[in-house]
Image: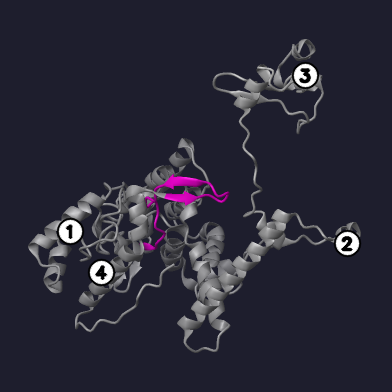
């Protein structure tokens, strides 16, 4: 855990101050993550929950970040994709552009450094702009083995799906229908029990959360049906289908094909959104699709191939940590010196948790049960803390060499062994037959279940 510095630079130009902040973040990450880089290069011995040591490597697989942070980490200008070679005028293309690999980015940085001194901020920014770079000349991942921003910058469900819907899809629908009409339609919805209702509509909602985004998505297709052109409705429905399909926990070839088809359907019908006047800017109608998140959707399938299901990389957990790790400790203080008090609160909480965990593990190992049977019968409520310990406690188990045991039995070294022997071994495999099997079935049931018609005769011969 590291607290990144937040500083105020005194340079007169905003762009230079932003450049210095970006470089500071990369320098900080470079320092903090150095042990992981060493482990990725030469390996390190690490213990598993049972205590066994393993020789491990730590490649950079995924970095959970929203769109601006991805551009920052990839050292790419906001007007270019952080994971592909697309620039802002190509964000609406209906096909994925080639990935912007780490090698290409480092080569572009090297060319920019040749054209201008990195310490001459204004001139270097001009040189970096020609290569769609942000101006950071020492990315933190440059010496991290196998790291590639086009791979470790994975799609992030909270911002790339739900926030995309709120900032764009919902706004297109609201512009075409009008705020009053869409609010009226939302107020008429008969919401099922347990689902959020929008009796006052959605156009005036403030401080919405990811849960609100998901709730509105459930109703939007039914709300706009009949009030928008068919292709407009089809494009919105296709984009929502893409969002839902991409959140599946596991994928096969058919599932990935459905994801690609949904995105293709959106691009095939998205012209209806512009023709209906749904794309509006501060200066009037927009005739382009310069939306960074829209371009990132083209790389969801490739990310699933590289890093697995995108749902595991959602920022929901880290965003919720703002409440449990920052807001709640801040409320527990006296509204003075927030950072120090929050740090002390988290430190004390961690010590209490570790002490409680250690004492419960010790109790579990000793098998303490000092309660009478009567007291145990009176207990109806589960002990959730004791159940929590089971995730950490693993009982020790002696490893038995059944090859040696089988050899000893075969040579007669154990004359008192029960006959027939229950341990056998070949050159590569050892078998031990349980005296009390965990699954009790009759011989006839086992013969029928496993298709062993001669099982009874074989047991008789044995």
Please, what secondary structure does the residue beneath circle 3 have? loop
Give the x, y percent position of residue 310.
46, 51
The image shows residue 345, relative to residue 265, as above or below, that is: below
Instruction: Decide which of 3, 184 is in the foreground and name it.
Output: 3
In the rendered structure, which disc, 2 or 3, sits on the residue that comes first in sequence? 2
Q: Mark 2 points at which residue?
A: 375
Cα gap from disc 1 to disc 4, whole angstroms: 13 Å
In the rendered structure, which disc, 1 or 3, sits on the residue that comes first in sequence? 1
Give the x, y percent position of residue 54.
47, 45
Please identify the residue farthest to the right as the structure is shown.
374
Disc 1, disc 2: CB below 8 Å?
no
Give the x, y percent position of residue 107.
17, 53
Disc 2, disc 4: CB below 8 Å?
no
Disc 2, disc 3: CB below 8 Å?
no
Circle 2 Cα neighbour tier, 10 Å, few/some/many (<14 / 14–19 / ≥20): few
Give the x, y percent position of residue 198.
59, 70
**Does residue 190 appear in this view?**
no
Q: Mark 4 points at which residue?
A: 23
Cα gap from disc 1 to disc 2, whole angstroms: 71 Å
Q: Name the residue under label 1.
A: 109
């Amino acid at each position: 855990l590291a607290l990144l510095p937040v500083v105020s630079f005194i340079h007169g130009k905003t762009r230079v101050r932003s450049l210095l902040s970006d470089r500071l973040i990369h320098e900080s990450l470079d320092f903090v993550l150095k042990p992981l880089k060493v482990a990725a290069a030469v390996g390190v011995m690490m213990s598993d929950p049972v205590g066994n040591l393993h020789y491990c490597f730590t490649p950079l697989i995924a970095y959970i970040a929203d769109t601006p942070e991805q551009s920052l980490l990839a050292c790419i200008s906001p007007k270019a994709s952080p994971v592909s070679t697309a620039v802002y005028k190509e964000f609406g293309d209906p096909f994925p552009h080639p990935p912007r690999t780490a090698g290409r980015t480092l080569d572009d940085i090297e060319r920019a450094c040749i054209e201008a001194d990195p310490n001459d901020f204004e001139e270097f920014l001009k040189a970096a702009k020609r290569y769609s770079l942000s101006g950071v000349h020492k990315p933190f991942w440059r010496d991290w083995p196998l790291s590639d921003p086009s791979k470790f910058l994975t799609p992030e469900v909270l911002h790339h799906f739900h926030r995309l819907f709120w900032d764009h899809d919902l706004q297109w629908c609201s512009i075409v229908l009008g705020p009053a009409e869409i609010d009226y339609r939302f107020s008429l919805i008969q919401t099922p029990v347990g689902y959020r209702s929008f009796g006052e509509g959605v156009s005036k909602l403030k401080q919405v959360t990811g849960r609100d985004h998901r709730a509105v998505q459930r109703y939007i297709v039914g709300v706009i049906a009949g009030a928008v052109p068919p292709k407009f409705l089809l494009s919105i429905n296709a984009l929502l289908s893409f969002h839902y399909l991409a959140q599946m926990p596991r994928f096969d070839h058919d599932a990935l094909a459905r994801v690609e088809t949904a995105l293709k359907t959106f691009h095939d019908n998205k012209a209806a959104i512009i023709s209906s006047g749904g794309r509006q800017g501060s200066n009037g109608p927009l005739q382009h699709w310069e939306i960074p998140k829209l371009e990132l959707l083209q790389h969801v399938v490739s990310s699933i191939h590289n890093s697995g299901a995108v749902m595991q990389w959602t920022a929901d957990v880290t965003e919720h940590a703002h409440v449990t790790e920052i807001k709640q400790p801040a409320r527990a203080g006296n509204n003075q010196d927030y950072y120090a008090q929050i740090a002390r609160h988290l430190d004390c909480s961690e010590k209490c948790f570790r002490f409680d965990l250690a004492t419960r593990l010790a109790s579990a190992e000793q098998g303490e049960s000092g309660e009478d049977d009567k007291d145990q019968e009176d207990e109806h409520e589960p002990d959730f803390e004791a159940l929590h310990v089971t995730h950490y406690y693993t009982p020790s188990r002696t490893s038995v060499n059944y090859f040696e045991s089988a050899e000893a039995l075969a040579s007669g070294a154990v004359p008192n062994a029960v006959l027939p022997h229950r341990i056998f071994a070949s050159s590569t495999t050892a078998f031990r037959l349980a005296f009390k099997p965990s699954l009790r079935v009759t011989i006839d049931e086992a013969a029928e279940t496993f298709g062993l018609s001669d099982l009874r005769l074989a047991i008789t011969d044995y």
